[in-house]
Image (spheres, rainbow, N blue to C red):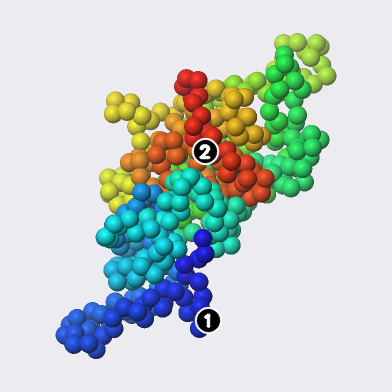
Amino acid sequence: MMPANTLRGDGRTDIEMNFDQVDRGGSGLTEDVQTSYSQAMEAETRRQPGEIRDAVLSVLRVHPSGVSVGAIIRDASRLIGDDVRESSVRSYLRLNTPRLFHRLARGRYQLAAFGDGPTATTNEGSFRTAVHGNATLVHADCLEWLEQRAPNSIHAVVTDPPYGLVEYSAKEQSKLRTGKGGVWRLPPSFDGVRRSPLPRFTVLSPADRVSLGDFFARWAAILAPALVPGANVVIAANPLLSYIVAGALAQAGLERRAEIVRLVTTMRGGDRPKGAHKAFADVSVMPRSMWEPWLVFRKPLEGRVQDNLRKWHTGGFRRPSATQPFGDVIRSAPTRKAERVLAPHPTLKPQGFLRHLVRGVLPLGEGVVLDPFCGAGSTLAAATRVGYASIGVEKDPEFFELADRAIPQLVGYQPNGGC
Ligand SMILES: C[S@@+](CC[C@H](N)C(=O)[O-])C[C@H]1O[C@@H](n2cnc3c(N)ncnc32)[C@H](O)[C@@H]1O
């Protein structure tokens, strides 16, 4: 997708040109109307370039099946924090249809990408994008991508980030792909079962841990402005490193709300003393992991929970049913082979678990769920399956291609019972 606010030859943007095309004062308007018109024009010209474009696009992204111009104006004004002129929005929509938008009916528009069939590969600014229904996959470093987001445009985050800093570097991925291991532990086959590789978090030095904290502090600081007030941020962690991520997120001003326990035994690794199994037959070196922590943070609310729910549609969790609260323990199986065949990513999370979690993060079922480290696109597939709009960002070109292929497969995947 080309940026709608492209700089023109005269150095002005499309949107600035749009303002020139709306009727100007001096055409028989009364003085009062003339004054409010001038004030409105002054407000429009004070805006940051691209502010209206970003707000309009954000609104359309959460309405995959289209939305009325009235709702676009209302929500865009809310995102910007100031009234947006109807004529500006209408002329922006008109001038960018059909390139960016479909006009579904009189006064009703849809992002063209959502109406292009199952897959459309486009370029959004400098980022390559693949669209699957209401899921948008972006090939980018999420830090760069997040820096360009409109404020208050993301309603929830569900993500499984890298933890070793280096395990998803080109060098370590090349070692893993050629079976050399590197920081990836390649467990031997056992009883005919081939286990998934696992990054060795225990190899992190004290300096690596500081860098990890710095990375997440920077990530959270860039993420926070893009979140709407009350947005949930749910992050897969592990018991060895979760305190570092939690500290960094709290430092960025996000509120720690809970920890969700994914009850899972992956059977990875041994618990006995290396090279001394027999000598110390009754010893476990560390507790064998039978759960996975998912940290739950929230952007501070605007007002009370009910105010925030009304204004931003966020600020809580969606209950599985009217009689059941959203709980903090979710039983889960390890990712099954049938699923890994569809999406061969070394740390693929299972659909059963993700669908339950992703459904829960939007209390009213409205908004956009972001996975900034989306791997094979499992969060996007889960979001699509539960009827939510989603965006996933993946830096590695091979995983981006993998996600592009895997998302439709994962959407259709039917787990054998439960999570
Ligand atoms: C732990 S994996 C997520 C796997 C995912 N849960 C799944 O089910 O497929 C983390 C992913 O983040 C990607 N990644 C690492 N750093 C990134 C960055 N700065 N921006 C975007 N993606 C990044 C890695 O390439 C990797 O695919």
Task: Estimate how packed mark 2 is, as few (under 14), some (14 to 19) or many (20 or more) residues with alpha carbons within 10 Å.
Answer: many
The kind of secondary structure element at disc 2 is helix
The alpha-carbon separation of the residues under discs 1 and 2 comes to 41 Å
Question: Is 66 on the left-hand or right-hand side of 278?
Answer: left
Whether residue 152 appears in this view of the structure is no
Residue shown at the point (36%, 29%) measured from the top left: 320
When asked about the image quadrant of residue 85, the answer is: bottom left
Above or below 128: residue 274: above
The image shows residue 22, relative to residue 115, as above or below, that is below
SS of the residue at dot 1?
loop
Q: Which residue is mark 2?
A: 408
Q: Residue at x 72, y 47 (%)?
A: 169
Q: Is residue 123 in sight in this rendering?
A: yes
- Residue assigned mark 1: 9
Front-most of 377 and 183?
377
For residue 132, the mark is none
Q: Is residue 11 above or below residue 196?
A: below
Of 230 and 119, nearer the camera is 119
> Do labels 1 and 2 touch, CB within 8 Å?
no
Q: Please name the residue shown 44% across and 61% down the image.
A: 100
Q: How many marks?
A: 2
Crowdedness of circle 1 by 10 Å Cα count: few (<14), some, many (20+)? few
From the viewer's side, name the closer residue of 209 and 169: 169
Q: Amino acid at mark 1?
A: Gly
Q: Which amino acid, by three-letter code, is at mark 2?
A: Pro
In percent of width and height, residue 393 lies at 56, 49
Q: Earlier in the sequence, mark 1 or mark 2?
A: 1
Which of 259/233 is in front?
Answer: 233
Is residue 42 left or right of 240 when viewed as pictured?
A: left
Q: Position of residue 332 (x, y in %)?
A: 52, 24
